[in-house]
Image: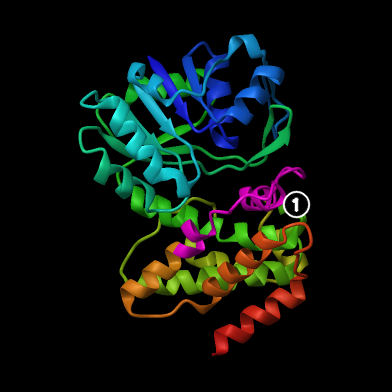
Amino acid sequence: MKIYIYGAGSIGCYFGGKLAASGVDVTFITRSHRYQQLSQFGLELTDYAGHYLKIAADQLNLTTDPAQVVHADLIFICVKSAATEQVAHELKQYLGQKAPLIISFQNGLSNVPILKNILQAQTILEGMVPFNVAALGHGHYHQGTSGAVSIKQYANQTILEGIFKKANLEIVFEQDMLAIQWAKLLLNLNNSINALSKLPLKQQLSIRQYRQCLAMAQQETLDLLDFAQIRTAKLTAIPTHWIPKLLSLPNPLFKLLSRKMLEIDPLARSSMQDDLMMGRATEVDWINGEVIKLAEHCGRRAPINKKLIQLIKQAEKMPTAFSIRADALKDQLESVAKT
């Protein structure tokens, strides 16, 4: 099976590297700057459990030519959500009526509908990556949290299951991916808060006021999901609707009851914080923005998530100087919640 990684960012490089190291035929379709980086340094993969993999540059199949997807049996789309429509048109141009399986491993809920609308000759599946991968530079990617990859159920899924297991990647196949995606998005609402804090995830979540900010954003979203009668899957040991209450507990009680939640590598940080630090546009419109879309669909408001979007947009304009203390962020969110 020939697997093509379309978008060699943190997730794409981590997946692709693990698969390539296990003997799978993997090709990375990447931009020129990442091509140069991987050609020089290869890939170095580490994780929270202490595992280490090194793939030399000459062992990687790299290309900047998207036309190469014509040879693919399976394509993983790992680009940022803002590039989804462009990638879909490129795939349509190069694939024509060829029908490799395409799996989107992207944040948010809007990417697969965009892909399906443009790529009507291909099968598009939803994928969800629960763990955090940080780019540490020079081809080094670090998995900071645990979890099994979720993919929409499909015929012949046992082939992909075997490939993932050989690469020591946990995988589950789900019927209701919408419930999975919303559950992941609820957790990803912390991305904007973590980015604004400029702290590692573990340190940020140890501060109660930051957790209370996340609890407010999650509760606002859960209320909208209940109104829209959209169910969410259980991705953690704690039922989804209990998480905001847990987050709001005083530090000693939170630490006592949420040991699993705090099993985060000290290096881990959100991809949104990475984007801000690198001066790139974030995916806030595909995370908190999905809550705004749901609110509009329901004829309701989502002022807390809207405020987080505004703050991230401000941070994008001056990423090195912008950060907000926990107490100040909590005050801002509580203020807009009352309006």
Label 1: how many residues lie within 10 Å, few (<14), some (14-19) or many (20+)? some
Query: Which of the 4 image quarters holds residue 37?
Result: top right
The count of marks equals 1
Q: Quadrant of the N terminus?
A: top left
Along the horizontal axis of the image, is 231 left or right of 122? right
Is 229 placed left or right of 37 in the picture? left
Pinpoint residue 302: horizontal percent, then vertical percent.
47, 76
Q: Residue drawn at (62%, 48%), measured in percent from left and top?
A: 271
Residue identified by numbered label 1: 200
Report the predominant secondary structure element of the magenta stretch. loop
Closest to the observer, 218 or 338: 338
Could you tell me if residue 248 is visible in this image?
A: no
Badge 1 element: loop
Instruction: Give the magenta part as a residue range.
Output: 260-289
Q: Is residue 302 magenta?
A: no
**Where is residue 165 shown, x and y percent of the image?**
48, 22
Q: Nearer the viewer, residue 333 or 210?
A: 333
Amino acid type, mark 1: Pro
| 114, above or below 87, in the image | below
Q: Residue at x 53, y 68 (%)?
A: 218
With 207 as the anchor, is 310 left or right in this view?
Answer: left
